[in-house]
Amino acid sequence: MTNRTAAVRYARALFDVNLESGDLRKAESDLDLFARLVDEHEGLRRVLFAAAVQPPKKRAIINDLRNRLREVSPTVTRLLTVLADRGRLALLPDILRFYRARVFEHLGVVDAEVTTAQPLSPAQDAEVRQRLAAAGAGEVRITTLVDPDILGGVVTRIGSTVYDGSVARHLERMRRTLLER
C-alpha cells in the first residue's frame, strides 16, 4: 500500500468516526494543531518519525503532548497512537490534507483561488466572498494571490473552472478581435 493510499484510509476512518459523533471540525482542528506542533519542532519530529524509537516511547510522547494541550479529542489521540504503533506518523500532513478535504466536501465548503493585481482590502475580500456565495458556490474558503501581470480585475479558480475577469485577458481578446478583422 502506498503512503498516499494509507493516508487516505486513515483520513477516511477518522472522518467516519467523527461523522457519527458530529465533531468533524474539532478533529480537524486537533489534527492541524498536532501536525503544526510536529512540523515546528524538529527534535520532536525526528523522534516521532524515527524507526529506531520504539512505539511505547512514541505513545508516551503523544500522551504527554495530549495532556499538555488538554483539548485534543479522543479520536485524534487514538489515531496518533495507531500511527505511532505502526510507524506511520510521517503520514500526518497527508492525513490532515485528505481529512480536511473530506470535511469541507461534506460541509459544502468550496476552495477558491482568487488572483488580483494588488492585495485585496478586507472590504474587497468580503465582497468577493459574498459574490461567490451568491453565485451558488456556498461557503467559500479563499486563497488570495497577487499577480501584477493581470493588470487589474480578478481571476478566480474554483476546482478546475477558471473565471478570468482580468484586464490582461480583456486586452488580449480585444487584440485578437482587431487582428481578425
Image (tube, rainbow, N blue to C red):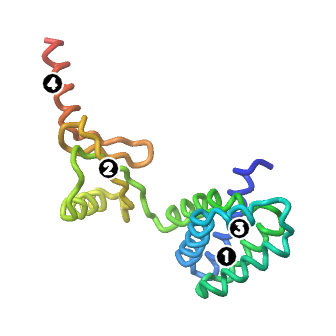
Q: CA distance from mark 4 to mark 3?
A: 52 Å
Circle 2 is placed at which residue position? Answer: 114
Task: Give the residue number, with chain letter if any, for mark 3.
Answer: 13
Q: Which of these two is toward me, 158 or 82?
A: 82
Q: Earlier in the sequence, mark 3 or mark 2?
A: 3
Residue kind at label 3, given as amino acid type? Ala
Q: Amino acid at mark 4?
A: Met
Report the amino acid beneath label 2. Answer: Val
| Residue 31, percent from left and from top | 60, 71
Q: Secondary structure at mark 3?
A: helix
Determine the image quadrant of residue 174: top left
Residue 174's tag is 4
Tag 4, which secondary structure? helix
Q: Is residue 18 left or right of residue 154?
A: right
Q: Which tag, 4 or 1, sits closer to the chain's start?
A: 1
Q: Residues within 10 Å of mark 1 (few under 14, many from 20)?
A: many
Question: Position of 29 compared to 45: left or right?
Answer: left
Which residue: 44% across, 63% down? 109
Q: Is residue 115 above or below residue 103?
A: above
Residue 133 appears at what percent x and percent y?
Answer: 30, 61
Residue at label 1? 76
Q: Residue furthest front?
A: 43
